[in-house]
Amino acid sequence: MQSVLTILLAVGAAASTPVAKQAPARESYGLAGGRENVGCVMTHRKIARFPVPVTIVRPGPVYEESTRLRGQLVSALSKPCERLENASVGPDEPAAKAYAVRLDKASEGVWSGMIAFDDVAPGSLRACGSMEGIHFTAWKGKPLRSARLWQSYFWLEYGLEPGGPSECREQDYAE
Protein backbone atom coordinates (compact mmCIF):
# COMPACT_ATOMS: atom_id res chain seq x y z
CA MET A 1 0.00 0.00 0.00
CA GLN A 2 2.79 2.43 0.90
CA SER A 3 4.56 1.81 -2.45
CA VAL A 4 1.32 2.43 -4.38
CA LEU A 5 0.85 5.72 -2.50
CA THR A 6 4.48 6.70 -3.23
CA ILE A 7 3.99 6.01 -6.96
CA LEU A 8 0.75 8.02 -7.06
CA LEU A 9 2.40 10.97 -5.30
CA ALA A 10 5.37 10.84 -7.70
CA VAL A 11 3.10 10.72 -10.77
CA GLY A 12 1.00 13.60 -9.41
CA ALA A 13 4.10 15.70 -8.73
CA ALA A 14 5.47 15.02 -12.23
CA ALA A 15 2.14 15.98 -13.81
CA SER A 16 2.02 19.28 -11.92
CA THR A 17 5.64 20.22 -12.71
CA PRO A 18 5.59 23.02 -15.32
CA VAL A 19 7.15 22.15 -18.65
CA ALA A 20 9.96 24.48 -19.77
CA LYS A 21 8.59 26.94 -22.30
CA GLN A 22 10.32 26.89 -25.70
CA ALA A 23 11.56 30.33 -26.73
CA PRO A 24 10.05 31.77 -29.93
CA ALA A 25 12.23 31.21 -33.02
CA ARG A 26 13.15 34.90 -33.16
CA GLU A 27 14.75 34.50 -29.71
CA SER A 28 16.33 31.11 -30.41
CA TYR A 29 18.98 32.14 -32.92
CA GLY A 30 21.30 35.04 -33.68
CA LEU A 31 24.38 36.17 -35.58
CA ALA A 32 27.90 36.11 -34.22
CA GLY A 33 31.18 37.54 -35.40
CA GLY A 34 34.60 38.23 -33.98
CA ARG A 35 38.32 37.63 -34.06
CA GLU A 36 40.21 34.74 -32.46
CA ASN A 37 38.38 33.94 -29.18
CA VAL A 38 36.25 37.09 -28.64
CA GLY A 39 33.36 38.67 -30.50
CA CYS A 40 29.75 39.67 -30.24
CA VAL A 41 26.28 38.30 -30.88
CA MET A 42 23.09 39.95 -32.13
CA THR A 43 19.80 38.32 -31.12
CA HIS A 44 16.27 39.21 -30.04
CA ARG A 45 16.64 37.19 -26.84
CA LYS A 46 16.79 39.31 -23.70
CA ILE A 47 19.45 37.92 -21.38
CA ALA A 48 19.76 38.97 -17.76
CA ARG A 49 22.04 36.26 -16.30
CA PHE A 50 25.45 35.31 -17.65
CA PRO A 51 27.22 33.20 -18.82
CA VAL A 52 24.92 31.65 -21.45
CA PRO A 53 26.27 28.73 -23.53
CA VAL A 54 25.87 28.91 -27.32
CA THR A 55 26.90 26.99 -30.41
CA ILE A 56 28.16 28.96 -33.40
CA VAL A 57 27.81 27.34 -36.82
CA ARG A 58 30.00 28.83 -39.51
CA PRO A 59 29.10 28.79 -43.20
CA GLY A 60 30.74 26.31 -45.53
CA PRO A 61 30.10 24.92 -49.00
CA VAL A 62 27.71 22.38 -47.47
CA TYR A 63 26.38 23.92 -44.29
CA GLU A 64 25.95 20.67 -42.35
CA GLU A 65 29.70 19.99 -42.78
CA SER A 66 30.84 23.38 -41.50
CA THR A 67 32.75 23.65 -38.26
CA ARG A 68 30.96 24.47 -35.03
CA LEU A 69 32.38 26.67 -32.32
CA ARG A 70 31.33 26.56 -28.68
CA GLY A 71 31.25 29.66 -26.53
CA GLN A 72 29.48 31.65 -23.87
CA LEU A 73 27.74 35.00 -23.87
CA VAL A 74 29.43 36.88 -21.04
CA SER A 75 27.88 40.38 -20.92
CA ALA A 76 25.50 42.83 -22.57
CA LEU A 77 26.85 45.45 -24.99
CA SER A 78 25.43 48.90 -25.78
CA LYS A 79 25.84 48.27 -29.53
CA PRO A 80 27.05 45.47 -31.82
CA CYS A 81 30.79 45.03 -32.29
CA GLU A 82 32.39 46.24 -35.51
CA ARG A 83 32.19 42.76 -37.07
CA LEU A 84 28.35 42.86 -36.99
CA GLU A 85 27.75 46.52 -37.88
CA ASN A 86 26.36 45.55 -41.32
CA ALA A 87 24.31 42.55 -40.22
CA SER A 88 20.56 42.34 -39.72
CA VAL A 89 18.63 39.91 -37.58
CA GLY A 90 15.10 39.95 -38.95
CA PRO A 91 12.58 40.97 -38.03
CA ASP A 92 14.14 44.20 -36.80
CA GLU A 93 11.22 45.18 -34.53
CA PRO A 94 12.03 45.33 -31.67
CA ALA A 95 15.70 46.03 -32.22
CA ALA A 96 18.13 43.16 -31.72
CA LYS A 97 20.28 43.15 -28.59
CA ALA A 98 24.07 42.80 -28.57
CA TYR A 99 26.15 40.61 -26.26
CA ALA A 100 29.85 39.84 -25.86
CA VAL A 101 30.83 36.24 -26.63
CA ARG A 102 33.95 34.33 -25.62
CA LEU A 103 34.83 31.12 -27.47
CA ASP A 104 35.87 28.04 -25.53
CA LYS A 105 38.76 27.50 -28.00
CA ALA A 106 40.35 30.27 -30.05
CA SER A 107 39.57 30.35 -33.76
CA GLU A 108 42.21 31.62 -36.16
CA GLY A 109 41.59 35.12 -37.52
CA VAL A 110 38.18 36.64 -38.22
CA TRP A 111 35.07 34.46 -37.94
CA SER A 112 31.30 34.80 -38.32
CA GLY A 113 28.31 32.52 -38.12
CA MET A 114 24.88 31.80 -36.78
CA ILE A 115 24.28 31.03 -33.11
CA ALA A 116 21.80 28.61 -31.64
CA PHE A 117 21.14 28.74 -27.92
CA ASP A 118 21.71 25.44 -26.15
CA ASP A 119 18.09 25.31 -24.91
CA VAL A 120 16.68 25.38 -28.47
CA ALA A 121 15.15 22.28 -30.01
CA PRO A 122 17.42 21.25 -32.88
CA GLY A 123 16.38 22.25 -36.36
CA SER A 124 18.18 22.43 -39.66
CA LEU A 125 20.52 25.37 -40.11
CA ARG A 126 21.56 26.69 -43.52
CA ALA A 127 23.81 29.39 -44.92
CA CYS A 128 23.91 30.47 -48.54
CA GLY A 129 25.72 33.15 -50.49
CA SER A 130 23.88 35.90 -52.33
CA MET A 131 25.40 38.69 -54.40
CA GLU A 132 26.87 40.69 -51.49
CA GLY A 133 26.44 38.63 -48.36
CA ILE A 134 25.33 35.50 -46.56
CA HIS A 135 21.76 34.52 -45.67
CA PHE A 136 21.49 32.43 -42.48
CA THR A 137 18.29 30.45 -41.92
CA ALA A 138 16.83 27.95 -39.45
CA TRP A 139 14.26 25.43 -40.67
CA LYS A 140 11.78 23.21 -38.83
CA GLY A 141 12.88 20.18 -40.87
CA LYS A 142 14.77 19.84 -44.14
CA PRO A 143 16.09 23.18 -45.42
CA LEU A 144 14.07 24.66 -48.29
CA ARG A 145 11.40 21.93 -47.90
CA SER A 146 9.98 22.73 -44.45
CA ALA A 147 8.83 25.84 -42.61
CA ARG A 148 11.51 28.50 -42.22
CA LEU A 149 11.73 29.49 -38.56
CA TRP A 150 14.29 32.30 -38.64
CA GLN A 151 16.44 34.29 -41.03
CA SER A 152 19.18 36.87 -40.95
CA TYR A 153 21.57 38.53 -43.36
CA PHE A 154 25.28 39.27 -43.07
CA TRP A 155 26.41 41.90 -45.60
CA LEU A 156 30.04 41.40 -46.62
CA GLU A 157 30.69 44.80 -48.26
CA TYR A 158 31.93 43.12 -51.45
CA GLY A 159 30.44 41.04 -54.24
CA LEU A 160 30.35 37.25 -54.14
CA GLU A 161 30.55 34.87 -57.04
CA PRO A 162 27.14 33.14 -57.20
CA GLY A 163 26.91 29.42 -57.89
CA GLY A 164 27.82 26.15 -56.28
CA PRO A 165 25.96 24.13 -53.67
CA SER A 166 25.52 27.09 -51.32
CA GLU A 167 23.75 29.43 -53.76
CA CYS A 168 20.60 30.97 -52.25
CA ARG A 169 17.12 30.00 -53.36
CA GLU A 170 14.02 32.18 -53.09
CA GLN A 171 12.90 30.29 -49.93
CA ASP A 172 16.05 31.51 -48.15
CA TYR A 173 15.01 35.16 -48.26
CA ALA A 174 11.32 35.34 -49.24
CA GLU A 175 9.16 37.41 -46.89
Image: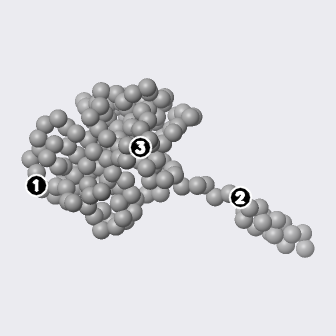
Residue denoted by label 3:
93
Disc 3 to disc 1, C-alpha distance? 32 Å
Q: Are marks 1 and 2 in contact (CB under 8 Å)?
A: no
Image quarter where the C terminus lies is bottom left
Which quadrant of the figure has residue 62?
A: bottom left
Q: Secondary structure at mark 1?
A: loop
> Nearer the viewer's eye, disc 2 or disc 3?
3
Numbered mark located on residue 17 in the image:
2
Graded by Cα atoms within 10 Å as few (under 14), some (14 to 19) or many (20 or more), the crowding at tag 1 reads few
Residue denoted by label 1:
163
Q: Residue farthest to the right?
A: 1
Q: Secondary structure at mark 2?
A: loop
Q: Amino acid at mark 1?
A: Gly
Q: Residue placed at 22% from the left, 39% from the top?
A: 155
Q: Are marks 3 and 1 in contact (CB under 8 Å)?
A: no
Q: Amino acid at mark 2?
A: Thr
Q: Amino acid at mark 3?
A: Glu
Residue 141 left/right relative to 74: left
Closer-to-camera residue (112/66): 112
N-terminal of the pair, mark 3 or mark 1, is: 3
Q: Is residue 106 above or below residue 125?
A: above
Disc 1 to disc 2, C-alpha distance? 51 Å
N-terminal of the pair, mark 2 or mark 3, is: 2
Residue 13 left/right relative to 98: right
Which quadrant of the figure has residue 140?
A: bottom left
